[in-house]
Amino acid sequence: MRLHPYAGLAFAILGGVLATESCSSDCPNCPGAPARVVISPNIVSVLPGDSVPLDAEVLDGAGRLLAGHPVTWELLDPAFASLRDTAHVAIVRGLAVGGARVVAARGGLADTNVVSVVTTSTFAAQVSPILRRTCALGGCHVTGGVPLDLSVADTTIRRILTEPGNKYTTPGDTAPHTGQLLTRLRGDTTPARLIMPPQGRLDSVAPADYHLISRWIVQGAAP
């Protein structure tokens, strides 16, 4: 029996449709049920009197972000901080030196983070986490970054930022904003493309982070 010249094409199309329907019924990319709550950033410090935002995301079992699942925030250590709940975002204000535990919960799922309220600032505990979560975004300052590569060890980054005669910082400088590090983070630079991070300068978007870096420089840029 001879088949019509287009019969093979018809069978191929039909097979493709059936295969597509089979895949779509499985819905491999559809979001699943809430599986965990994650607070970010996971390492955060704040000076007394400053405020820092915490964000909470609800994820399914595959790590996909789920929309429409607001969380409830709770502060476990009110002696050290205060908390203002705005659904997915909590504004934590430092009050006294110590660790303030913050909990984000949704339907039996929860995550806990500790906001460190500090008066001293070190590179490893305060400055490095800020730089890595803001200045490495969008491919900036990662492997091959120019001029500062944040993919290397903390000790290397700190050495570059504090070595004598460099243009970034002068450890112990009581006017730390004169160095290029804070000049760029504050946005006092021309041309505007030199403002860092590109998504918004730290003295307006995250003033608490800016203040911690400034305190680190004034106190001698400790490791």
Image (tube, rainbow, N blue to C red):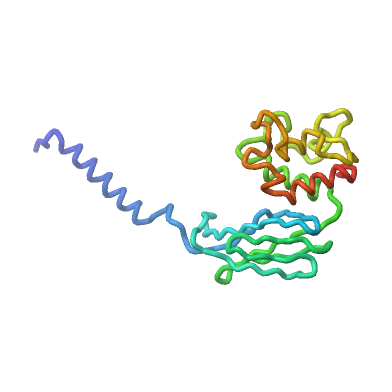
Residue 105, x across and y down, in percent: 60, 68
Position of residue 187 relative to residue 81, above or below, is above
Look at the image and tell me whether residue 151 can be seen. Answer: no
Residue at figure coordinates x 55%, y 71% from the top left: 107
- Name the image quarter holding residue 222: top right
Number of residue marks: 0
Position of residue 182 relative to residue 72, above or below, is above
Look at the image and tell me whether residue 171 can be seen. Answer: yes
Q: Quadrant of the C terminus?
A: top right
Residue at figure coordinates x 84%, y 50% from the top left: 121
Left/right placement of residue 116 relative to residue 39 reads right
- Name the image quarter holding residue 189: top right
Left/right placement of residue 12 relative to residue 141 reads left
Residue 187, x across and y down, in percent: 70, 37
Left/right placement of residue 14 relative to residue 217 reads left
Residue 184, x across and y down, in percent: 73, 36
Nearer to me, 111 or 26: 111
Position of residue 191 relative to residue 8, above or below, is above
Residue 160, x across and y down, in percent: 81, 33
Residue at figure coordinates x 72%, y 29% from the top left: 147
Q: Quadrant of the N terminus?
A: top left
- Name the image quarter holding residue 45: bottom right
Query: Farthest residue in the left direction?
Result: 1
